[in-house]
Amino acid sequence: QVQLQESGPGLVKPSETLSLTCAVSGYSISSGYYWGWIRQPPGKGLEWIGSIYHSGSTYYNPSLKSRVTISVDTSKNQFSLKLSSVTAADTAVYYCARRRGSDPIYYFDYWGQGTLVTVSS
Amino acid sequence: SSELTQDPAVSVALGQTVRITCQGDSLRSYYASWYQQKPGQAPVLVIYGKNNRPSGIPDRFSGSSSGNTASLTITGAQAEDEADYYCNSRDSSGNHLNYVFGTGTKVTVL
């Protein structure tokens, strides 16, 4: 059974960098598929942040692209998110997920439980 | 980037049928996937592709698509189906490498 688990600080100060890691078990990232980050501000909808392939190829939401970096560590079977210059608007539950599919069918089949990150001084 | 629009809320009587729709230009190029999210929990994939259900998803959930609209139908809604539902597809604008989520629909089972 594939499992994903997010970890990282639950509180980040404004203007600092948010850093999260997603540990994957039950499947080797090196075997394929894309891996992504999705967030959900309190009481609001889901927003795709970006995705990464095991080779390191990345794709980011254009609205966040200037502040986002997603990286992968296949030796630890995990991938990470960095979001710089955070503001209160970045307060959200952050999820990691596995993306499967090929044209014209794509979907996120496994999700982590999510971790709440609050931006506050 | 593309947008996916959903009705904010719908209600359904216990045991009846409810259809949730998702509209957007990207749905002319890509199939929608659908996610159920209960309070305090992570989203769960319920439908993907033309009409595919992951293992463990009841067959009362079904999907369809026509033009720029995708639909999720719950036939014989149960109390445990009360949740928020989100559609998602690849973004057909720009370089087609991004993803967009729908605005979400809250389903209430009466």
Image (tube, rainbow, N blue to C red):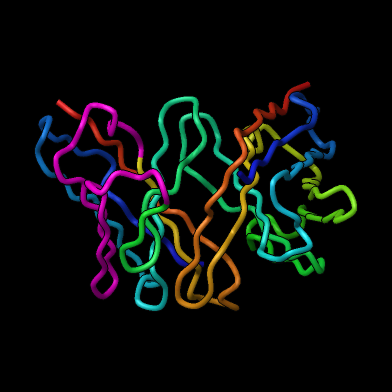
Instruction: Please tell me which residue is depicted at 30% across the width and 51% down the height of the picture.
Output: B6
Q: Can you say whether A26 is above or below A117 in the image?
A: below
Q: Nearer the viewer, residue B13 or A43?
A: B13
Instruction: Please tell me which residue is depicted at 74% across the width and 42% down the height of the picture.
Output: A22
Q: Can you say whether A14 is above or below B96 in the image?
A: above
Place of residue A2 in the rendered image (x, y in percent of width and height, measured from the top left): 63, 46
Q: Which residues are magenta?
A: B55-84
Place of residue A53 in the rendered image (x, y in percent of width and height, measured from the top left): 73, 65
Question: In the image as oriented, which residue stretches furthest toward the top?
Answer: A121
Instruction: Please tell me which residue is depicted at 65% across the width and 41% down the height of the picture.
Output: A3
Q: Is residue A95 left or right of residue B47?
A: right
Q: Can you say whether B76 is above or below A49 in the image?
A: above
Determine if the magenta segment contains residue A105: no
Classify residue A54 by image quadrant. Answer: bottom right
Q: Is residue A53 left or right of residue B30?
A: right
Place of residue B110 in the rendered image (x, y in percent of width and height, measured from the top left): 14, 25
Q: Nearer the viewer, residue A37 or B94?
A: A37
